[in-house]
Amino acid sequence: MLFDTHCHLFDEKLLGDLKEVVERAKEAGVAEIVVPAVDVETSRQAIAIAEQFDGVYAAVGVHPEAANDASEEDFAEVAKLALHPKVVAIGEIGLDYYWDAAPRPKQQDVLVQQIRLAKQLGLPVAIHNRDATQDTVRILEQECKGDVHGVMHCFTGSFETAKQCMELGFFISFGGPVTFKNARNVREVAAKIPDEWLVVETDSPYLTPHPHRGKRNEPSYVALVAQMLAEVRGQDIRQLESYTTDNAHRLFPKIG
């Protein structure tokens, strides 16, 4: 069985046939899915979807692209929503210096505030990092220190960065990019991650894996990610499915 640790089921590209999307995931062996939010409204949507389906869970939080508009009232609402029984993490949170939709100091403040919320609630965090590795790792080193663990979502960084994150208690998650033909560096890093720190995701409806690249992504395609990881790691696919699912349960202890 597989566990898609990061899938935006509230996206309009998936809402139109959401029941069928979830059914296809189950048929593909995906037993569990976590739906991370990007702001307060999608936090509510993620919870509503999790309530509809067995094996579907939510994460709540404010993404760095939404950080500029985040208010204290928003953080209070995220904290309230995080108490829902099907909320298993704070996320998707982090830094994004590629789009720079919010000033960098604001992004950092929003990230720190949400890590501290996760610490208070005993929840893991799902971290988004795009072109902001130095500041992301620095903040994780300052704020986590064994008190907060989590996952580096859709990891495409170096093995050295992965090691720093694993030392802080962060799982390394790979999605569709590991299957891309030009992603040799991502596959080389993926091959080195210790079994006990690896998890898989789709980031649906984005980053669709080969051979469906360019089309809508959905959680059933996490099987393609797992197959590629098994190949580059020289492992049996059933073995990889088993330990990545066990790891996801350790990552999200409310489920495991």
Image (tube, rainbow, N blue to C red):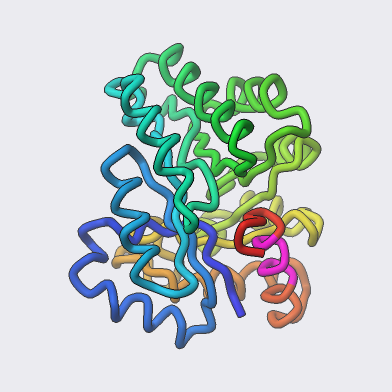
Residue at figure coordinates x 81%, y 56% from the top left: 194
Residue 91: in magenta span: no
Q: Is residue 233 above or below residue 99?
A: below
Residue 248 lies in magenta, yes or no?
yes
Up-down: is 86 above or below 148? below
Left of 100 or right of it: where is 195?
right
Q: Magenta span: helix, strand or loop, mainly?
A: helix
Q: Nearer the viewer, residue 28 or 77?
A: 77
Quadrant location of the N terminus? bottom right
Residue farthest top in this picture: 105
Q: Residue at x 69, y 41 (%)?
A: 149
The magenta stretch spans which residues? 243-249
Tell me which corner region of the image, top left, top right, bottom left or bottom right, holds residue 65.
Answer: top left
**Spot occupied by residue 74 in the image (x, y as percentages of width and height):** 33, 28
Q: How many marks?
A: 0
Q: Position of residue 117 (x, y in %)?
A: 54, 30
Name the image quarter holding residue 230: bottom right
